[in-house]
Amino acid sequence: MRIAVVGSGYVGLVAGACFADMGHQVILVDNDGQKLAALKSGDVPIHEKFLPELLERHRGHALTFSDNLEEAVRSSNAVFVAVGTPPTEQGEADLSYVESVARGISGAINGYKVVVEKSTVPVYTSDWVRKIILRNGAAADSFDVASNPEFLREGTAVTDFLYPDRIVLGADTDRCAAVLKEIYAPLTDGSYYHRATAIPGPDRAQVPPPLIVTSAKSAELIKHASNAFLATKISFINAVASICESVGANVQQVCQGIGADSRIGPRFLNPGIGYGGSCFPKDLMAFRSVARECGYDFRLLDEVMHINEDQRQRFLRKVRSALWTLRGKHLGVLGLAFKGGTDDIRESPAILLVQALVQEGCEITAYDPAAIERAREVLPKQVKFAANAYDAASGADALLILTEWDEFSALDLPRLAQLLKYPIVIDGRNLYDPEGMAAHGITYYSVGRIPVTPEKPPADAGIPARKFTSS
Ligand code: UGA
């Protein structure tokens, strides 16, 4: 199939590269000349596993780059719209880029086209895209508008795309559904996975993935409802973690107990410092607005957002309870990205916490395996950056873990305990076993579990807020 993907952001770039790997001929369209030049010359603008390999493999052959939307539409069977839908001041999704692409597509229709929403958009967007294309002169039977939501996560975007839990095709006509089915056939008939060059899948991959065909409106809702549900799961467990802290229970054990119920499942039940990123915060607000406009007051989502905010405040209180006063305290910080495996700092709770700690007078030395360059642009000048986790910890009054990078869960603990001025670790991602930390002489605070302090703290260890031994 010949496919145009409009927008070379996270979703567009990954989708374009993966469609090319599935055997399609893809033109990636963007109106940012600099970005296109960088992509053409071999740059990989985002930190994403397997993306450099895919771009290298297909650049200039199955994957080309262009700033000419009309030409790309004319030479394609399907046009995937993956442009940004940033939030407005009121929290709604700003659909002006989608509208302008729809206008551009209209004039270039030269035969049957399927226009596919790939960006996360509110319900009714497909109706509007159809109206705009008609209004600008295209014949009603020359195109269909479909919704094909994307469920990829940053950090595992390529494997999420190629090994999805499900493929949702929101198509209102058989003709349109047939085009989309053909596009995804290499995945749904399993042929992609037999190729020697196929990107390797994760352990729990469901191959071939199930196909769910719905109306366009249902597909639009599936996307918003999925993200809202996942965010609700995270806020729910964060609320439970707060109760665990009050009563001295262990949230990890509680998660094990509730996650074992197959109706609930163990995933997305990790408590922490709240969800961030370019999707959950924005999509929750947008879904809230959509519901309001449709006449439903979705107050559950307000509470999900409120718990998420509160989770950061609770973490700040934890830092205070561990260190007493904060002015002039030197803190090592591990993690700035909104989650592990990415250099993305958009709506990162780690960044928000570092900003708050600097405001309280802390001196911060931070390390992140991928996000330092981006973080440098938004953090106050006085924040220092280290070359590795140990340099960040060196001489610090305490070490804070704010992002769940794999490398942070395998630190050399004796070395860490020695490097810190006081062996105190405040872990917002529950990467360590409290007993193990205490055994290494580290006073350890985490989320939803009682803090532990070594029974015999080293002579110069800081005074923990509460006296607990591990149990
Ligand atoms: C999320 C969804 O997981 C994807 O399915 C969706 O396609 C994407 O949004 C999108 O709409 O584009 P992403 O934002 O990349 O993906 O990241 P997640 O892995 O979902 O993590 C989001 C935030 O929740 C991170 O800050 C993460 O640290 C936090 N989180 C996640 C938790 O605090 N606990 C968990 O158990 C899981």
Image (spheres, rainbow, N blue to C red):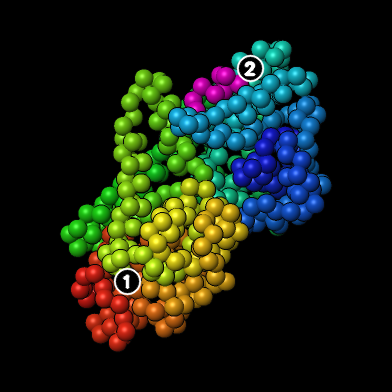
Q: Residue 114: tell me if it is visible.
A: no
| Magenta residues (range) | 122-129
Indicate the position of residue 436 as horizontal and vertical percent values: 33, 77
Observer-nearest of 251 and 191: 251
Indicate the position of residue 338 as horizontal and vertical percent values: 49, 53
Q: Outermost residue, bottom direction? A: 459
Q: Is residue 2 above or below residue 307?
A: above
Observer-nearest of 46 and 371: 371
Name the front one of labels 1 and 2.
1
Indicate the position of residue 387 as horizontal and vertical percent values: 57, 71
Observer-nearest of 181 and 393: 393
- Say which amino acid is labelled 1: Tyr
Label 1: which residue?
Answer: 444
Q: In the rendered view of the protein, which quadrant contains the C terminus?
A: bottom left
| Mark sitting on residue 436 | none
SS label for mark 2: helix
- Is 224 positioned to the left or the right of 434 in the image? right
Q: Residues within 10 Å of mark 2 (few under 14, many from 20)?
A: many
Indicate the position of residue 178 as horizontal and vertical percent values: 64, 28
Give me the residue at 40% from left, 31% from top: 288
- Label 1 vs label 2: CA separation? 57 Å
- Is 318 positioned to the left or the right of 63 in the image? left
Q: Is residue 308 above or below residue 450?
A: above
Label 2: which residue?
Answer: 132
Give me the residue at 43% from left, 59% from top: 358
